[in-house]
Amino acid sequence: MSSKKKKKLTPAQKEYQTFAKSKEPKRPVFKNCVKAFIVGGIICTIGQFLQWLYMTYFNFTEVTAGSPTAATLIIISVFLTGLGVYDHIGQWAGAGSAVPVTGFANTMASSAIEHRSEGFVLGVGGNMFKLAGPVIVYGVFSAFIVAIIKIAIERLGGM
């Protein structure tokens, strides 16, 4: 709560807030961080293995192996979401499963699955991109700003 709202509380409300806070379960922050670290690390290790696989057996370079690696991770994530497995991983790992590209794919697939009864266009397409739209817009806008800064630095450095 903001400090303004705390000032307006009656003594009974303050007492209740203190009581409620004392009954609130304590979160195991360290344990949650370890779980997130382990699952995020496993996902990234799988990604590294896939990249090695593409470089070794399909003659990709380190640079060109990135796209098929990300695509493979996304496909695996969507498949596991469809089976209901990724949600269990996400509940156990928390942010560890949400941070890599697989987390974004999971959210998109979950949204599509949830709204499929409303039809493909308005249900799946419309609701799936309610989440993805802001992420894509923010990413494109951020890339635009970074490109402008880079160009400005290059131009000023060349003078």
Image (tube, rainbow, N blue to C red):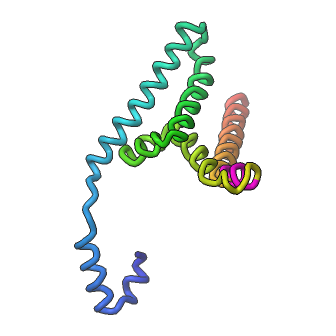
Picture quadrant of residue 117: bottom right
Image quadrant for the N terminus?
Answer: bottom left
| Majority secondary structure in the magenta region | helix
Q: Nearer the viewer, residue 127 or 136?
A: 127
x 59%, y 44%: residue: 109
Residue at 57%, 28% in the rendered image: 70
Relative side of 49 to 32, left or right = right
Residue at 47% x, 22% y is 48
How far across and how far down the image is residue 124, in percent?
69, 50
121 inside magenta stretch? no
- Which residue is more in the foreground, 14 or 27? 27
Locate residue 53, reporting x and y percent. Answer: 51, 13
Q: Position of residue 86 (x, y in %)?
A: 46, 41
Is residue 67 placed above or below 129 in the rendered structure? above
Position of the C terminus by quadrant: top right
Q: Quadrant for residue 82, please give it.
A: top right
Quick one: 38 or 92, which is closer to the camera? 92
- Magenta highlight range: 122-129
Name above or below for residue 141 compared with residue 70. Answer: below
